[in-house]
Amino acid sequence: MPKFVKIAEISKYEGKEVTLQGWLYNMRSSGKLRFLLVRDGSETIQCVVFKNDVSEETFNNADKLTQESSLRVTGTVAADKRSPLGFELQVKEIEIIQIAQEYPITKKEHGTDFLMDHRHLWLRSTRQHAILRIRHEIIRAARDFFDNRGFTLIDTPIFTPNAAEGTTTLFETEYFGGSAYLTQSGQLYGEAAAMAFGKIYCFGPTFRAEKSKTRRHLTEFWMIEPEVAFCDLYEDMQLAEEFVSHLVQSVLKNRKNELEVIERDISKLEKIIPPFPRLHYKEAVEILHKNNIDFKDGDDFGGADETVISEKFDRPVIVHHYPAAIKAFYMKRDHKEPEYALAMDMLAPEGYGEIIGGSQREDDYDLLLQRIKEHKLPVEAFNWYLDLRKYGSVPHSGFGLGIVRTVAWICGIKHIRETIPFPRLMQRIYP
Ligand code: 4AD
Ligand code: MG
């Protein structure tokens, strides 16, 4: 018997006396009874204090407790069919660790700004707790997926000398008298690693100086990016759909309670099984035009356009062959229709927008050099990247999945600021 038991493991101790340590989530009183709802991070349990069963000190201690006070509570574990956990604690003793001051987050409705200002405390709320546990499961399943398929994890740098995804969203920082940029994507380093290890993934924070205040953009978000040597666009799309399906199915399997807490419609998630529908960019544009959307052929899709396209399907849809002119410099073009890039985006259902961006990479030295110049990027900063096309260049592809948008979609929450513990937005860097 451990000295302190985790509430999540309480079922192992039915009929036994245990001590829990945690925080008071809520309390109800009724005559000689006090019902303490205690949470310890793993779960929440109702602890029943009956005046006749405890010392006067323990009963008084119960009455002193305020919301979020920290405590240790000892009692007997009893089965209780009515509680979601299936067990309650019949209290013998309460030890107060700290009496919390008046807690700012109460049962009444608070505005989002207020809650975001108190994000460090808001994390304790049942709903936020559930969302972040689902996020953890998505990340765990993502690592598992690649680890089980022979990919090597390669950590890519955060300080970089050059842009990967266009110069308009670069964060510049002083670097010993020179300057450096915070990474927008680990991809270019991932390509170098793929030539060394065959199949790799990187997973880390990425930064975009997004000047848009949409519910889909953060300035700092985590991205997982596989990169595979000897892989074309079609194999890349297949990897992406198997990957996303694995994430959703893992959450369904391992985080059912949390999905229930946030009232997610599970039937929508159960459908996320490959193959996913695929559309050529031209077919996607046709859908927009059929829906009377004023969209110029050749432009990139905005959030509203993505919603119209994805609403036609009950699983994520992959749009491929975007016009090369609106895509990144490193994307290979299709030799059969050279104005289109071997690019793909995966759009989540229910209006959640792009969760994956990927492509086959340009593997020809001369063409890549030409693209770098066309995009007015500094060639010196890319010499190492060009080297990869000099020494054993092979067809290769990869993609990046943004964790925050994926969590938002799987959880069915509107704004991505709730899908990361401490969100960074254009107008928010506190707490
Ligand atoms: O489409 P993006 O820009 O692609 C890349 O960065 C490639 N280098 C990835 C690769 O091929 N290895 O970004 C990939 C994904 C998007 O689909 C989106 O999910 C997410 O990253 N993303 C953002 N998420 C939140 N806030 C932002 N500002 C985001 N920008 C991109
Ligand atoms: Mg993209």
Image (cartoon, rainbow, N blue to C red):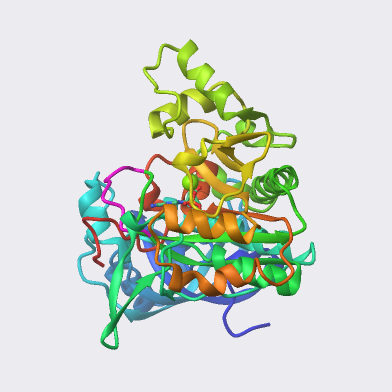
Residue 217: image location, x then y, percent: 36, 49
> Is residue 107 positioned above or below 313 on the image?
below
Who's the residue at 53% across and 38% down the image?
264
Visible in this render: residue 15? Answer: no
Residue 5: image location, x then y, percent: 59, 76
Pick the residue in front: 377 or 56: 377
Residue 157: image location, x then y, percent: 49, 76
Q: Main secondary structure of the magenta part?
A: loop
Highlighted magenta segment, given as a residue range: 208-215
Which quadrant: the C terminus? Answer: bottom left
Which quadrant would residue 121 be assigned to in this image? bottom left
> Is residue 150 positioned above or below 180 on the image?
above
Pick the residue in front: 265 or 11: 265
Pick the residue in front: 161 or 351: 161
Asked if residue 71 lies left or right of residue 279, the reply is left
Who's the residue at 74% across and 34% down the image?
275
Which quadrant would residue 105 be assigned to in this image? bottom left
Which quadrant: the N terminus? Answer: bottom right
Who's the residue at 31% across and 60% down the image?
424
> Is residue 326 positioned above or below 358 on the image?
above
Who's the residue at 31% across and 53% down the image?
210
Visible in this render: residue 34? Answer: yes
Which quadrant would residue 9 be assigned to in this image? bottom right
